[in-house]
Image (spheres, rainbow, N blue to C red):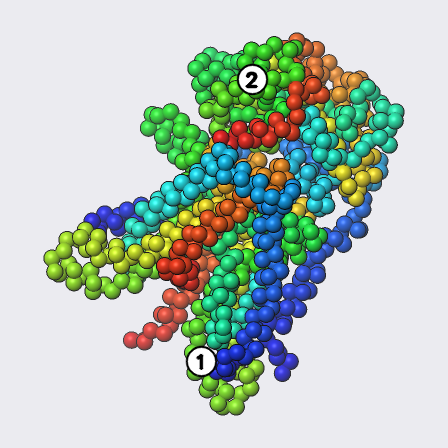
């Protein structure tokens, strides 16, 4: 039975991996349509993607928006995380719950809410509008990541620094931050990816000049199954690959470095 | 040390600066007052429009025209309501122009030359500039029907004789008349439509309809990729595939002719330029060029002076097809177009 | 940012730290959400008409029922597929486990749209699956735009959530437990059924809840490759707004969707505590 489970597990792994891998050869296909295996190979669609403003503009828009969202999210979440993790106060449980709320609401519900709300305050189809909406949606994940990091932080280090005469601000800069920065980076990264990939809300609140990449992809898939989508998908796939594999390799390398030499 | 107040303050200033800097669209809107955004159907349609309508207009007036896709009646309604305009001008079919007028989504053409001194009869219709006629035809995969595919809408409905998947446009006022023709109603006795009978007829073909297309490119892609065996789509898209040697066949019998109109979204800040564009778009030489390249039929009779016999023969309004095709009579629809559309959408989902 | 030990209860410190975020969320999250609720009873005119229509109208009830049913199916498919994979990951050597983790994590981080597109390629009539079926001598299968294609794609997309939930729990099972059960005479399948599964139960419930809730609100995939006859509620809501500007009707459906989601999460919270769900 154990063997059966493990074999089944391997099959499921193939199920998980195949769709991810298939976009790569598709991006080099010469076919105009969704044909696999591709009838021929070229890099023409890559040229089409990088040369077409109708694709590069949404890409740049998304990158810019996601960066702003990451910064804003971390800026707002950091003090709140410190408050929740390090202080005791009445209503803490409720605050915890409230911060999780955006995760519980389906994006389509928020999408129509934001559509009406941003239209009322004249921010519909503007960059600030999208950034504010995406930030609100990114808060829970950033909070979770940051609070997990903060909970694991050894406060003895801080107490040592303080007892040696450092001011709270200095302690934070020279003791807390250097240890915690991976947490900040992770929270920012989560917020960045969340915003960059966010589709549903963007469909409703982004516009012609502020179009995001997911919205362009959705429209494209829906109407033409444009082969350029395969190019975008491949580029995104490699971005994710770097994001996932690099830390793994880094950790493996640092572990090897820390191993005692023979 | 200058780096007090860590990344939070820095982040907030950075964030504030980024937000301010990214608010450029509003600034852009002020500077680029001489840009017009026009909705197009993409592909061959858009290329024809750019070459024959947009570029000449820009040469004459200096106003830049940027094409915007996809075409969406819903977006037209949304932008008028929300005030965030994605396009100033769009193209509508007959059913949609009725709905658009009912919902007060269009700028009136009363002060334009189209109404005051019309270049041809019917140049302005329901606040739209009459541009061209196109047809919804039957197209099918040759490989699937080696002995010939459906030759009429009744054939299209006949799932025993012509088994396979179907696809039609998600557009009520275009599909309901077709359903009636398939049910045996003579083409000259269609209007006013018996809407209930049309829906009953549609029920018979529903099991075979795998999906409902909304964009011209999409219909072409479904046919070209082999996802659909028989499809009701625009003639120009089918002809383009045939010209590319794709193994599909077009059926002109019982084709449904419909008219397309240029309209201006109500309340757009570029209203005046948009109305100028409308006036320019029906000029015979330009319409002729557009129709030649997009394979549509011009509604301005003077345009035929610029077209050869061979070119005119391929258009849905050609004399060769008279008697085989039928025209929509939207003003005599037989009910409220909007209500019929709602009912159609509901019907699709059940 | 206080680096000193926690001050006495009732101090202002924490609230000052929380203020920016709470104010921000109040304005840019709660207000839009409240607007949805308000629109559901005020557009086009005040009253509970939309809710009455949802409760009595066949169309809306069917869409909701379809959505719930599909979410259940997807959740259980994720469980059936996810458990073997998580088990294999937990039982594998560190090298293999890392590889499997990388694959699952990459799927987790890859956008819904990219994965949906990949399934359109896989299931298309000119795709690899169709070619294999044709090669075997059968008629070309028509897999896209069906309930099947929609379900498979959603299962694939939500599977990493299930796998990661299960893996976390399975990994934490003391290896001595199954070993001692085996040494006491239990067969391997007995060990799995009576030792591993009960210990994995929290992860199973976690995964099921997460996948179910996410699937209820799924928008993108059913629209792009699902059947138009079996629309899910998120797609219908979007269509009501986009096509008909029927904000009232759409908002009412949205509120019902949200309520269902909150009920499920509430039940989970009552029993286990919500912070465990995403921990």
In the picture, which quadrant includes the C terminus of chain C? bottom left
Identify the secondary structure beneath mark 1: helix
Identify the secondary structure beneath mark 2: helix
* Left or right: A138 in relation to C200: right
Badge 1 density bin: few <14, some 14–19, many ≥20, Cα 10 Å: some
Q: Residue furthest left?
A: C185
Residue B291 at least partly seen: no
Q: Chain of mark 2?
A: B
Q: Chain of mark 1?
A: A
Residue at position x 16%, y 63% from top?
Answer: C180
Q: Position of residue A254 (x, y in %)?
A: 40, 70
- Compared with B260, B152 (above or below) is above
Badge 2 density bin: few <14, some 14–19, many ≥20, Cα 10 Å: some
In the picture, which quadrant includes the N terminus of chain C? bottom right
Q: Position of residue A204 (x, y in %)?
A: 61, 46
Residue B299 at least partly seen: yes
User: Foreground: B240 or B281?
Assistant: B281
* Left or right: A94 in relation to C26: left
- Compared with C23, A52 (above or below) is above
Q: State which mark lies toward you, 1 or 2.
A: 2
Could you tell me how far apart the alpha carbons at marks 1 and 2 are, in whole angstroms?
Answer: 77 Å
* Left or right: B133 in relation to C251: right
Residue at position x 68%, y 38% from top?
Answer: B77
**Of the numbered discs in the image, which one, if any, rests on residue B197?**
2
Q: Position of residue B17 (x, y in %)?
A: 68, 64
Residue at position x 61%, y 58% from top?
Answer: C28
- Compared with A139, C64 (above or below) is above
**Of the numbered discs in the image, which one, if any, rests on residue A155?**
1
């Amino acid at each position: 039975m154990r063997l059966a489970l493990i074999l089944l597990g391997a099959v499921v792994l193939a199920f998980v991996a195949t769709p991810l891998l298939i976009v790569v050869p598709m991006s080099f296909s010469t076919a105009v349509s969704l044909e696999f295996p591709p009838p021929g190979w070229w890099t023409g669609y890559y040229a089409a993607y990088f040369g077409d403003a109708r694709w590069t503009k949404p890409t740049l828009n998304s990158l810019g928006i996601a960066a702003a969202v990451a910064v804003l999210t971390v800026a707002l979440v950091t003090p709140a995380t410190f408050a929740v993790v390090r202080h005791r106060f009445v209503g803490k449980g409720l605050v915890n719950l409230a911060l999780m709320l955006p995760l519980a609401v389906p994006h389509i519900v928020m999408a129509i809410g934001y559509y009406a709300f941003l239209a009322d305050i004249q921010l519909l189809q503007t960059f600030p509008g999208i950034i504010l909406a995406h930030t609100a949606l990114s808060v829970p994940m950033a909070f979770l990541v940051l609070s997990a990091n903060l909970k694991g932080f050894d406060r003895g280090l801080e107490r040592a620094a303080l007892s040696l005469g450092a001011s709270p601000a200095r302690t934070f800069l020279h003791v807390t931050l250097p240890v915690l920065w991976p947490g900040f980076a992770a929270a920012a990264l989560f917020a960045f990816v969340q915003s960059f990939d966010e589709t549903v809300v963007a469909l409703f609140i982004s516009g012609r000049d502020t179009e995001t990449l997911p919205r362009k992809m959705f429209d494209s898939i829906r109407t033409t199954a444009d082969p350029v989508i395969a190019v975008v998908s491949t580029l995104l796939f490699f971005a994710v690959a770097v994001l996932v594999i690099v830390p793994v390799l880094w950790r493996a390398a640092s572990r090897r470095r820390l191993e005692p030499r023979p | 040390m200058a780096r007090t107040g860590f990344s939070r303050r820095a982040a907030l200033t950075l964030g504030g600066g980024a937000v301010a800097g990214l608010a450029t669209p509003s600034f852009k809107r002020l500077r680029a007052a001489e840009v017009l955004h026009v909705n197009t159907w993409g592909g061959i349609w858009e290329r024809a429009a750019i070459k024959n309508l947009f570029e000449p207009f820009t040469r004459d007036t200096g106003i830049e025209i940027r094409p915007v896709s996809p075409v969406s009646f819903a977006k037209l309604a949304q932008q008028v309501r929300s005030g965030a305009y994605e396009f100033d001008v769009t193209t509508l079919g007959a059913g949609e122009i009725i709905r658009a007028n009912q919902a007060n989504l269009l700028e009136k053409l009363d002060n334009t030359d189209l109404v005051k001194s019309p270049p041809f009869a019917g140049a302005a219709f329901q606040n739209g500039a009459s541009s061209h006629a196109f047809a919804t035809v039957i197209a099918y995969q040759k490989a699937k029907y080696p002995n010939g595919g459906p030759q009429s809408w009744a054939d299209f409905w006949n799932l025993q004789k012509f088994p396979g998947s179907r696809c039609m446009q998600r557009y009520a006022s275009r599909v309901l008349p077709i359903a009636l023709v398939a049910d045996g109603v003579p083409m000259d006795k269609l209007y006013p439509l018996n809407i209930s009978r049309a829906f009953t007829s549609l029920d018979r073909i529903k099991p075979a309809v795998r999906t409902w297309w909304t964009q011209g490119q999409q219909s072409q892609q479904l046919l070209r990729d082999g996802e659909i065996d028989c499809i009701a789509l625009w003639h120009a898209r089918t002809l383009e595939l045939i010209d590319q040697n794709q193994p599909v066949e077009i059926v002109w019998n019982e084709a449904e002719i419909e008219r397309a109109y240029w309209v201006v979204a109500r309340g757009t800040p570029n209203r005046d330029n948009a109305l100028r564009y409308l006036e320019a778009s029906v000029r015979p030489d330009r319409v002729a060029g557009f129709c030649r390249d997009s394979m549509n039929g011009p509604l301005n009779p003077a345009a035929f002076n610029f077209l050869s016999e061979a070119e005119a023969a391929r258009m849905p309004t050609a004399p060769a097809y008279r008697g085989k095709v039928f025209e929509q009579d939207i003003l005599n629809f037989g009910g409220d177009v909007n209500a019929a559309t709602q009912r159609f959408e509901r019907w699709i989902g059940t | 940012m206080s680096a000193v030990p926690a001050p006495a209860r009732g101090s202002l410190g924490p609230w000052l730290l929380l203020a920016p975020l709470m104010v921000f969320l109040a304005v840019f999250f709660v207000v839009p959400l409240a607007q949805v609720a308000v629109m559901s009873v005020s557009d086009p005119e005040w009253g509970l008409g939309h809710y009455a229509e949802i409760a009595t109208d066949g169309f809306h009830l069917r869409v909701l029922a379809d959505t719930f049913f599909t979410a259940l199916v997807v959740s259980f498919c994720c469980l059936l597929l996810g458990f073997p994979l998580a088990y294999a990951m937990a039982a594998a050597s560190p090298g293999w486990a890392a590889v499997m983790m990388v694959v699952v994590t990459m799927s987790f981080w890859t956008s819904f749209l990219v994965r949906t597109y990949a399934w359109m390629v896989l299931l298309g009539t000119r795709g690899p699956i169709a070619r294999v079926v044709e090669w075997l001598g059968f008629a070309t299968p028509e897999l896209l735009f069906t309930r099947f294609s929609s379900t498979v794609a959603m299962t694939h997309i939500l599977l990493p959530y299930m796998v990661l939930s299960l893996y976390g729990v399975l990994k934490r099972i003391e290896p001595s437990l199954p070993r001692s059960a085996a040494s006491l005479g239990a067969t391997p399948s007995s060990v799995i059924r009576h030792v591993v599964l009960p210990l994995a139960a929290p992860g199973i419930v976690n995964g099921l809840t997460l996948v179910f809730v996410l699937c209820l609100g799924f928008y993108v995939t059913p629209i792009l490759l699902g059947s138009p006859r079996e629309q899910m509620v998120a797609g219908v809501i979007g269509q009501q707004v986009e096509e008909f500007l029927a904000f009232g009707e759409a908002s009412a459906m949205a509120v019902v969707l949200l309520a269902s989601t909150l009920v499920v999460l509430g039940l989970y919270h009552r029993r286990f505590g919500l912070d465990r769900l995403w921990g």
